[in-house]
């Protein structure tokens, strides 16, 4: 079978002279892969001129719904992928991480649409006030880069490795060219075929290269993003590419690293955390046959527990059944291929020069349901390094398979130093029942690790584990791990956006961002905003409310009703030395009374108020002062989840954020009386409230 590439909207078969790919279990040839005939320059241009514009004209809401639809489609096809995944040497649990973990990333990034505006762009951070009278402000706008994301992926996760990246760039509005590692590209090709057949993505959003992609980086430009997952040596070679340097192309590297798992010095064999540690280390050694960029390569334990850990780990690994993943009881499959097996054996031989094997033997192990001479099978190998500060090969050489090194430490500070000898890793974990030990380790080791898992008996049951990067958290690490960062929820999206500082008047910035900025001009209508449907409301639309004069009785009654009898409201003799001149109104009374001024009581399109953000009180309100409200539509957010009414009927709604600007109306009254021009009364309190507003169109 010849694998096909997908380029410029067409499936293109490779040549017969391509690389032969083998079944990792049986050793039989399954496909050939070749990129002969592909024009990489045209592919990049097609992504930029067809895929990019198609994605950029969509809003974040639309892109999010696209990801959700694609995730649901791939979920319905997952059994096809499981059958093919077997040939990569993976067990069903291994494949679950790869296949459904990848689809899960699509779902996660689809859900991020609720955190972005219904625009093709977004804004970042808070407004910068650049002038005394607030007539000149600054903000940051983020627009999709007008290039292509080129993803060069590793062999160990042919599905997750693709989907965890493309979910982010598609959501940001950037097309992708995916280059999976050739050895397992037959699985990636199967997934891409289903993606293209679904017609969920716009034209040009995805292209695939199954064979070699040598030379593609010669065609990148400064709007492109290149990501790489794989060995540190290959990553460094790519990172130094002349074209990348000349064009200042954003390059993200996520390299294999010598991750470690630490057993806290507070743990003894009788504590539950000891068993948790043994289970976690075993899982990380055997999952995907140790072929994970996050796998535990260094097992760091208190020196008094080295023997206990050795015995417990040996017993647990002895129950590990290696063989054909289709055979019942098999827990560990094969490496990705014979070339990978040969490479791991070579690294094991190098490590054997400075440390000794205490568990495992390349010759003496059994394979269930398969021929170990034909498949790429190997047993777990555990080394013991009794002097890890002197014999440092274990901190420099990585055998990318079920291979790890056990080493002792005397104090937590020593454990921290050992963890750092890996020169930067994707993940470290510490199993401890002591939060004091946990804090010491985290603060001391964090600079050298992209993620740290703190595991104890309290969270172990629901923990996702040492080796599982999560879509909402960053995945990457310093130093040897590449210095890159992937996923991370919103953080990851910004890698594909250009952040640009913009400066202007509040009104201009409001109209550019479609998000009301304090001090911008108001839109005044003759209809109360609560009488309008979601579609009819405009950002900057403002209601100027009647005013209310605060009385002593207001303060006394609110204190009785709320139970808030703080001295500043009720005890005038206790105010000496405070900022208050006399008893002051409760901040929450001021906010509550403001609601009474802007709320329109009759039933209308506004269905409910479900939150308050950014509430603060900026000036005391004393009895005799008057307050008013400038009630402004700040932002409109699309919402695809209908509200279910009490009668079971579904009602389509949108979310509206309102700025509640409570001002000192007594100052305004004085100005009005004297005919003095100026801004309306000084703000005394400000908040953002969130409401669900019915849509006019319920079809």
Image: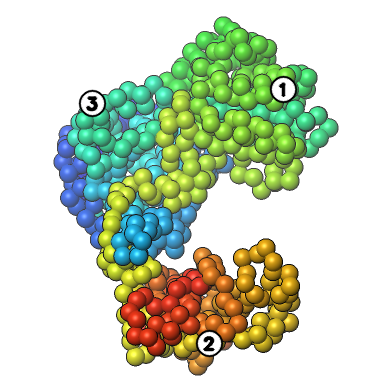
Q: Earlier in the sequence, mark 1 or mark 2?
A: 1
Q: Going 24% across and 52% down the picture, which residue do you hit? A: 52
- Give SS at disc 1: loop
Considering the numbered disc 3 on the image, is that residue within a helix, a strand or a loop?
Answer: helix
In the picture as drawn, the residue positioned furthest to the top comes out as 353
Where does the image place residue 653, in percent across and percent down from the top left?
A: 44, 77
The label on residue 242 is 3
Q: Earlier in the sequence, mark 3 or mark 1?
A: 3
Residue for badge 1:
411
Q: Residue at x 81, y 29 (%)?
A: 269
- In this rendering, would 666 be left or right of 317? left
Residue 634, position in %: x, y? Answer: 40, 72
Alpha carbon separation for disc pair 2 and 3: 68 Å
Q: Nearer the viewer, mark 3 or mark 1?
A: 1
Nearer the observer, disc 1 or disc 2?
A: 2
Numbered tag placed on residue 548 in the rendering: 2
Q: Which quarter of the picture shows residue 253?
A: top left
Residue 460 picture quarter = top right
Residue 614 lies left or right of residue 179; in this view the side is right
Give how far apart the Cα atoms at labels 3 and 1 are.
46 Å
């Amino acid at each position: 079978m010849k694998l096909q590439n997908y380029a410029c909207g067409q499936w293109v078969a490779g040549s017969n002279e391509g690389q032969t790919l083998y079944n990792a279990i049986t050793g039989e040839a399954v496909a050939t892969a070749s990129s002969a005939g592909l024009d990489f320059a045209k592919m990049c241009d097609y992504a930029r001129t067809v895929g990019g514009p198609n994605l950029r004209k969509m809003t974040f809401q639309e892109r999010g719904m696209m990801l959700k639809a694609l995730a649901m489609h791939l979920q319905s096809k997952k059994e096809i992928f499981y059958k093919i995944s077997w040939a990569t040497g993976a067990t069903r649990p291994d494949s679950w991480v790869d296949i459904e973990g990848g689809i899960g990333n699509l779902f996660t990034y689809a859900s991020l649409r609720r955190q972005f505006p219904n625009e093709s762009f977004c804004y970042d951070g808070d407004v910068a006030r650049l002038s005394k009278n607030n007539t000149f402000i600054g903000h940051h706008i983020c627009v999709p880069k007008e290039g292509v994301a080129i993803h060069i992926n590793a062999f160990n996760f042919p599905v997750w490795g693709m989907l965890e990246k493309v979910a982010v760039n598609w959501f940001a509005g950037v097309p992708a060219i995916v280059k999976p590692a050739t050895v397992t590209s037959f699985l990636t090709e199967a997934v891409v075929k289903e993606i293209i057949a679904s017609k969920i993505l716009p034209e040009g959003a995805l292209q695939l290269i199954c064979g070699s992609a040598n030379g593609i980086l010669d065609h990148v430009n400064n709007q492109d993003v290149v990501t790489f997952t794989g060995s540190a040596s290959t990553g460094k070679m790519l990172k130094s590419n002349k074209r990348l340097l000349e064009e200042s192309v954003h390059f993200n590297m996520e390299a294999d690293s010598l991750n470690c798992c630490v057993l806290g010095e507070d743990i003894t064999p009788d504590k539950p955390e000891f068993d948790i540690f043994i289970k976690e280390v075993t899982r990380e050694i055997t999952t995907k046959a140790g072929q994970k960029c996050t796998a535990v390569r260094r097992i760091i334990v208190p020196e008094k527990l080295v023997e206990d850990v050795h015995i417990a780990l040996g017993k647990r690994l002895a129950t590990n059944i290696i063989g054909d993943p289709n055979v019942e009881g098999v827990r560990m499959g094969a490496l990705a291929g014979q070339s990978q097996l040969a490479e791991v054996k070579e690294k094991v031989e190098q490590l054997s020069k400075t440390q000794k094997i205490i568990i495992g033997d390349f010759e003496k192990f059994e394979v269930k349901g398969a021929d170990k001479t034909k498949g790429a099978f190997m047993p777990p190998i555990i080394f013991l390094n009794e002097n890890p500060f002197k014999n440092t090969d274990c901190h420099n050489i990585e055998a990318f398979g079920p291979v790890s090194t056990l080493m002792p430490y005397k104090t937590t500070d020593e454990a921290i130093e050992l963890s750092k000898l890996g020169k930067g890793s994707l993940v470290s974990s510490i199993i401890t029942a002591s939060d004091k030990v946990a804090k010491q380790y985290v603060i001391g080791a964090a600079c050298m690790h992209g993620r740290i898992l703190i595991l104890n008996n309290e969270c172990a049951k629901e923990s996702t584990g040492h080796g599982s990067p999560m879509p909402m958290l960053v995945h990457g690490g310093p130093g040897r791990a590449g210095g890159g960062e992937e996923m991370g929820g919103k953080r990851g999206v910004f890698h594909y956006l250009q952040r640009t500082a913009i400066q202007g008047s509040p009104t201009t910035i409001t109209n550019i961002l479609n998000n009301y900025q304090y001090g911008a001009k108001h839109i005044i209508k003759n209809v109360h905003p609560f009488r309008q449907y979601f579609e009819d409301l405009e950002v900057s639309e403002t209601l100027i409310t009647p005013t209310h004069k605060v009385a002593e009785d207001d303060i006394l009654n609110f204190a009785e009703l709320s139970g808030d009898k703080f001295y500043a409201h009720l005890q005038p003799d206790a105010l000496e030395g405070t900022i208050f001149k006399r008893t002051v109104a409760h901040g929450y009374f001021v906010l509550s009374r403001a609601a009474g001024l802007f709320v329109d009581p009759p039933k209308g399109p506004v269905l409910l108020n479900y939150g308050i953000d950014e509430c603060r009180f900026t000036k005391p309100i004393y009895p005799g002062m008057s307050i008013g409200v400038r009630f402004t539509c700040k932002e409109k957010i699309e919402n695809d989840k209908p509200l279910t009414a009490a009668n079971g009927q579904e009602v389509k709604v949108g979310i509206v954020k309102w700025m509640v600007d409570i001002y000192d109306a007594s100052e305004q009254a004085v100005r009005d009386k004297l005919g003095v021009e100026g801004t309306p009364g000084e703000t005394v309190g400000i908040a953002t409230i969130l409401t669900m507003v019915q849509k006019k169109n319920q079809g």
